[in-house]
Amino acid sequence: MLLELQHITAAYGPVQVLEDVSLSVPDGGAVGILGANGAGKTTTLRAISGTVRVARGTIAFDGHQIRGRRPEQVAALGIAHVPEGRGTLGNLSVRDNLLVGAYRRKDRKQVEQDIEFLLDLFPNLRRRYKSNGSALSGGEQQMMAVGRAFMSKPRLLVLDEPSLGLAPSTAKDVYAAIRQLRVESGIAMLVVEQNANLAFSIVDSAVVLETGRSVLSGTTAELKGNDEIRKAYLGV
Amino acid sequence: MSGLRAPNTAVIAAATRPTPWWRTTWFRWTLAAVVFLVLVVIPFIADPYSNQTMTRIMMWAVAILGLNVVMGYAGQVSLGQIFFVGVGAYATAITLKSHWGVDLGLLGAVIAFVLAAVIPGVLGFLVALAAARLRGIAIAMVTIALPIVGVPLAKRFSDLTGGAPGISPSSKWFRTPDWLSGLLYDDQYRYLLALVIAGIVFLLVAFLVRGKFGRAFAIVKANESVASAMGISPYRTKVLAFTIASAIGGIGGFLYVVVNTFTSPDTLSFPNSINLIIATIVGGAGTIIGPILGGVYFQLVTQIPTALQASQWTTVIQGIVILLVLFLLPGGLASLPRVIRRLTAKRPDRHVGTGTAPAPIPGNPGTTKE
Amino acid sequence: MQLFIQLIVDGLAQGSIYAALALAIVLVNQATGLVNFAQGGMAVLSAYIGLAVVDLLAPAFGPGLVALAIVIAIVVALAFSFVFGAAVERLVMRRFERGDEDTAVVATIGVLTLITGLVGIIWSYNYQHFPWFFPIAQSFSIAGIGVSVWSLTTFLAVIVIMIVLQLLFMRTKLGLGLRAVADNPASAALSGLKVGRLLMVGWGLAATLGAVGGILIAPKLQLTPNMLDSVLVYALAAVVIGGLDSPLGAVIAAWGIAIVENLSAAYLPTIVGQDLKVAVPFAFLVIILIFRPQGLFGRKAVVRV
């Protein structure tokens, strides 16, 4: 297993948000985190990247225990987090945004090649290459955010609600691009998504959260195939 | 639902507990009366030097009270308060010295007082008209210009202001008036005069702050967008706060002349501007008693090093004290009882909070997050 | 006409000092969102360190090598300012960066007071002479206009600084990091940038900028703890006029302020004159702010609710 969460808990001050969450992502695999609003999906991602304090449980990544480590350290180990809201660096150009993603890397030539790779994958970004981040549309910013995370050459890409705030057709385009990225690079992914259908288009399996607990998990086929589960948890 | 927890019994117990005796109304009124009596009687017991020191404290307390209105209650950093103090002082001194060319007799003192409040108030109003539209930080950056510009202005119009050496009105103004001459020595007279003026100003501000203006200040300070959504114009509120602050500062300037019997361009210098800010925060911004504590602090921090032949240490001490206060006691000395109570109280349901940034320029205890 | 150009030249030189401090203030504001009222005080401290080094080395070096002593002193002073600036960010300002900005301003005022007080105690409040490479009054003529060497040096120094800053910020990785942290620290952290360290570098860099201004003006003004108080006020005015987020705007505003000041002192000697020339920039400031609260070059502030 590349990433393994076991029974983690997390709180914001006195408010307990995660009570018992477990999930795992195999190397090169893609796992979705599904569930209603407020179920704790984003908090789970924050627990992994170190931006929220985890009181109990273990988080193991690539053999390391990463519970309690700072975000910079988690990023250094090979987890790239694309936050909700995309984290666009508005005053920097698209190129600079991508370069920030590659900040820790020392291999300049490879960095330039990776940028080319991304621009081929996301032709929109090529068109907007010199524009400031804040001038991009929502969909373009989302693709740039994914690109920025990818530039750090991570083992695991963590995406928080890529479809948030996007029109349905734009969201579909974004997901198509992410799927292409997965196919061409073989990178592992963990995707939080409210829209289960979109998630199913790129993940192999998924975990369902309800009020801070992981209550259900299974492969995409299993979850999609089960009518009861679909209606109860996925609203599909 | 898993989100609900059992009712917090400690909170309920606290809410239904009978008021402790030190908070009851009758105790507070009795305390106020006792304090008032003590204040009135002290000058007859103490020596002239102590009386003068206490009068100085009252003077600074008034100046700081003005700054407190704009900084503590309305939440804007003004580096120009000392300018208004200086203008008030000059208005007083010029009136008392030259009577503006007219013989005014005793009325002169009253006119001096009125001008000392009105002229700075008008100037403050004008400054605020331009400055209050800016972001808070820009207000600080602009008001800093006031003392810097004020000093050469004071020196330039030397016919009026006496130039660099300043003005010293005739001492007859600062002696006990004839109709009281048997009862009071000069220093006692000045003390009581300051006490009456300061007392009235403090009471006025206390009422102001408790009323709708005080609430408007607090809302604007907390969040300007919310204020405008509620129909309170942040711009107008800030202009009002500034005007009041400058008028009060001017009254402080009047008292300055009463105590020191002269004024000069040094009164409104930049270092003094900073001293006022530090004293305001150290005393406790956003409270009524804070300025009094700030006045005591300010007087001590200048007086003690001078007495010890180490006056150059005042600045360093000021720097250390303000940083310590900001780090450890952001509510100033006025918040000390509350902090001590919190540190010594037993709290069964203490929870680990997320680390948050320190509170904004400390406001009333009720408005900051615990 | 000659006088006019002379005044402009002098204004550009004087304004360059304001510009150095203004750049420092803008840099700190862009990196950490704070306005550092202690910028001038920190610069003065660095200048005093330089003086201490010169006093230490000059007797040992002898009269022929005074210039070398001054060079070493400048290098030491700039290095010190960088470290000091970084230390102030880490030890004092870190606590206030995410809170209310007015509280942070008071904290910087506290730092200013502390520095001024310490400098006064260590070196006294008397004027100290700061030795320089050439006599301050030394000048030469271009087309009949007297240009003092000092003016030229100062003006060129600021131009060089601006070019270096531009290169640093736009072409280097460090510059990219500083810009990223200034724009969106949370996102930068997720990308693995060491945010804390970059903030310290930002403050260190700003302190060095201010120190350059302080060292340039020290030989002219004579060193005293309060030497840069009024320069600070000019720099703040320049930043407000030029826009809090525009380095170029701040520099141009700084030059403008100094030029206007000189012109009004010379052409309106009775109304303004040498002593009241300090009031003229502020009169302009007030007028500009009434019509454009965000300054001439700044962007309208977006209030995040």
Image: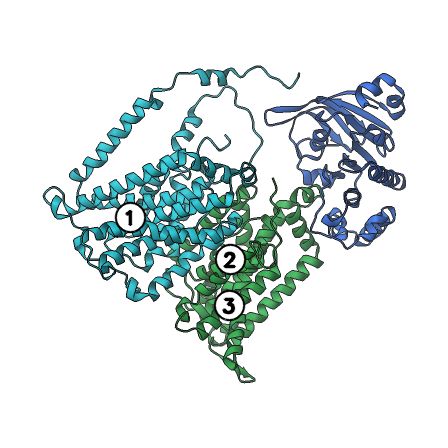
Chain colours: A blue, B cyan, C green
Pointer 2 residue? C236
Task: Find out whether the residues at labels 2 and 3 contact each other: C-beta distance under 8 Å.
Answer: no
Q: Nearer the viewer, mark 1 or mark 2?
A: 2
B323 lies above or below B37: below
Q: Secondary structure at mark 1?
A: helix
B39 lies above or below A95: above
Q: Is residue A213 left or right of residue B324?
A: right
Q: Is residue B303 left or right of residue A108?
A: left
Pick whichever, A43 or A172, lies toward us.
Answer: A172
Residue C55 pos. (x, y %):
44, 66
C293 lies above or below A60: below
Q: Is residue A115 left or right of residue B263?
A: right
Q: Residues within 10 Å of mark 3 (few under 14, many from 20)?
A: many
B134 lies above or below A182: below
Quadrant of res A16 = top right
Residue B229 pos. (x, y %):
57, 37
Image quadrant containing the N terminus of chain B? top right
**From this viewpoint, is residue C72 visible?**
no
Residue B88 pos. (x, y %):
32, 53
Q: Secondary structure at mark 2?
A: helix
